[in-house]
């Protein structure tokens, strides 16, 4: 490039480059330095992109004892900054600059790139390798930021960045690799889809205070995202459109504390098959208008929904189907509006609140070791009976097992009795009749001492009947004196002999009564014995 063809501003930059000095073309009036109004800037602030390309491509050597760099502030860059496939060994630092055309850094090898508070009609950096930081803080980028397949060895800083590409990809970062932290915070705004599928972040991913806007589509599409540390989508985070984290892995914790998600016609948060090494917080004012799904997720610590607002009346508001978690804190700020699906989840400790139980639940296959609070069997049965699938045996068995493990055997038996009664409602007329008799007589075996009451009643009945109609004597030689009470008791006892039954024999209808007492005594006596054994035993 001929130095004689350079403008005054370009010459200043050319001369400053070998020593890495900064060139500031901005106005003394701060109101005139907004890059959004760069079309009003005079020729003293114009720099051709080809001059930047020449410097970055090695047109000049660094002065001895200095590190060469392009450091430019307040310039309007005209033409195409095209560094595709270039190998740039010096830093590029642009502050408060405006680009007429989108820079192209695709498959370039860059040292470090700072474009702070700049205005760009797009930025194409697909496949780019940055050996330092990529710093875009405060910039406004229209037409999309492309970082797909890029590798950044340092920090990716997009704090305060505004991306605007409605209906398209605001950020295209499929398979992006960042060795350190990624900052999309401090007012970061994206109008269009933010894509991070298959991306890898070696530090933290921070969306604190971010606003993502893509109504009806994916506001954040980050399936198979891999973050080594924590993910923050809190501190005023909001999204219109779905958040998709299916199959993502988080090495620390995931925070949606106070986040506002809106995708009312579908899923607001899809975290199916998510893997988190510690905790997940969808709490303290977290609001989702649309479904929230952690189906198949694996959370080593706690999933907290304390103080959350879950609203999807027309479908599943919360899906924990097949979730594996050490603890689930299901205590939202108000009753869940929609179905809460906990089917086949495996949870060590489930903490909930009766006041905010969903009206509709799915509990079949749910496994838990403990409940907090355990509540009484009557209260927990109301929880089970909210299942939209109707009667399912497994939830009753699980609840009864938990009560027994807590030493609450009576509550466990109450649950199993309720299970038998609820099952009876699903059976045909004949089975309902038999079941009703079992319930009335012995409470399906879970109220064994009710049989003792029946035994006493039958004993009184037999005593009255046989006191009025003495049975005939089988052997006149030697027999005890007839006692209707002892005789009835001898008939009812399934074992033992009181000397009455083998001596006296009723006839006719009274023989049928005696046989009825024998059979009833056998059945009821065994029930009482089983109940006594269960009460005395200790698991």
Image (cartoon, rainbow, N blue to C red):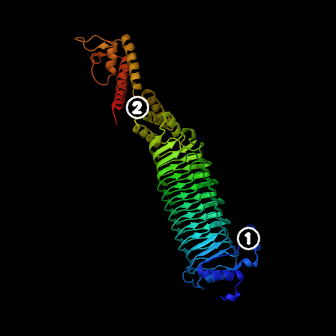
Where residue 127 sits: x, y (%)?
56, 74
Q: Is residue 388 visible?
A: no
Give the camera-side residue of 484 and 419: 419
Give the camera-side residue of 478 and 408: 408
Give the camera-side residue of 47 and 110: 47
Where residue 327 sits: x, y (%)?
47, 47
Where residue 427 sits: x, y (%)?
49, 37
For residue 437, above or below residue 64: above
> What residue is disc 1 on?
28
Q: What residue is rendered at 43% in x and 37% in y?
A: 403
Q: Based on the displayed image, in which of its 4 quarters is residue 410 positioned?
A: top left
Between the C-alphas of marks 2 and 1, the distance is 92 Å
Neighbor class of circle 1 (other Cα within 10 Å; few <14, some 14-19, many 20+) is few
Tell me: 26 left or right of 461: right
The quadrant the N terminus occupies is bottom right
Q: Residue furthest left?
A: 477
Q: Based on the displayed image, in which of its 4 quarters is residue 113 positioned?
A: bottom right
For residue 391, above or below residue 142: above
Where residue 353 sits: x, y (%)?
54, 40
The local secondary structure at tag 1 comes to loop
Neighbor class of circle 2 (other Cα within 10 Å; few <14, some 14-19, many 20+) is some
The quadrant the C terminus occupies is top left
The local secondary structure at tag 2 comes to helix
Dot label at residue 445: 2
Q: Is residue 281 visible?
A: yes
């Amino acid at each position: 490039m001929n130095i004689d063809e350079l403008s005054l501003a370009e010459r200043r930059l050319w001369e400053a480059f070998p020593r890495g000095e900064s060139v500031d073309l901005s106005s003394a009036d701060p109101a005139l330095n907004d890059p959004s109004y760069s079309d009003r800037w005079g020729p003293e602030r114009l720099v051709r992109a080809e001059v930047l390309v020449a410097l970055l491509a090695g047109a000049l050597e660094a002065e001895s004892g200095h590190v060469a760099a392009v450091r430019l502030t307040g310039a309007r860059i005209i033409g195409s900054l095209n560094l595709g496939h270039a190998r740039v060994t010096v830093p590029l630092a642009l502050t408060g600059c405006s680009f007429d055309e989108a820079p192209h850094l695709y498959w370039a090898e860059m040292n470090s790139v700072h474009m702070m508070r700049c205005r760009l009609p797009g930025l194409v950096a697909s496949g780019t390798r940055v050996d330092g930081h990529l710093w875009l803080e405060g910039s406004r980028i229209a037409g999309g930021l492309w970082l797909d397949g890029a590798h950044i060895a340092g920090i990716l800083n997009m704090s305060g960045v505004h991306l605007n590409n409605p209906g398209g990809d605001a950020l295209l970062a499929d398979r992006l690799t960042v060795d350190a932290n990624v900052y999309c915070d401090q007012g970061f705004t994206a109008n269009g889809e933010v894509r991070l599928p298959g991306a890898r972040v070696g530090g933290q991913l921070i969306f604190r205070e971010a606003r993502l806007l893509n109504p009806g589509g994916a506001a954040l599409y980050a399936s198979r995202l891999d973050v080594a540390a924590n993910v923050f989508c809190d501190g005023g985070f909001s999204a219109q459109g779905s958040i998709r984290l299916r199959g993502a892995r988080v090495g620390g914790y995931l925070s949606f504390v106070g986040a506002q998600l809106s995708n009312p016609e579908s899923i607001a948060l899809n975290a199916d098959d998510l893997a988190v090494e510690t905790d997940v917080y969808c709490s303290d004012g977290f609001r989702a208008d649309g479904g929230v799904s952690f189906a198949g997720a694996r959370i080593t610590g706690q999933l907290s929904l304390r103080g959350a607002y879950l609203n999807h009346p027309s479908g599943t508001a919360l899906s924990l189907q097949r979730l594996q978690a050490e603890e689930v804190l299901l205590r939202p700020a108000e009753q869940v509006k929609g179905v809460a699906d906990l089917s086949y989840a495996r949870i060590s400790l489930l903490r909930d609140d009766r006041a905010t139980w969903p009206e509709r639940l799915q509990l079949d296959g749910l496994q838990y070791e403990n409940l907090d609070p355990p509540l009484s069997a009557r209260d927990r049965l109301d929880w089970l009976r909210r299942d939209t699938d109707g009667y399912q045996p497994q939830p009753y068995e699980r609840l009864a097992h938990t009560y027994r493990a807590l030493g609450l055997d009576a509550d466990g038996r109450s649950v199993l009795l309720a299970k038998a009664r609820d099952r009876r409602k699903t059976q045909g007329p004949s089975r309902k009749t038999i079941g009703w008799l079992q319930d009335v007589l012995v409470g399906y075996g879970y109220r064994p001492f009710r049989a003792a009451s029946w035994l006493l009643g039958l004993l009184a009945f037999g005593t009255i009947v046989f006191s009025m109609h003495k049975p005939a004597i089988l052997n006149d030689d030697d027999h005890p004196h007839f006692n209707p009470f002892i005789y009835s008791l001898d008939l009812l006892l399934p074992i033992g002999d009181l000397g009455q039954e083998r001596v006296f024999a009723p006839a006719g209808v009274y023989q049928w009564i005696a046989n009825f007492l024998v059979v009833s005594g056998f059945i009821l006596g065994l029930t009482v014995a089983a109940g006594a054994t269960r009460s005395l035993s200790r698991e």
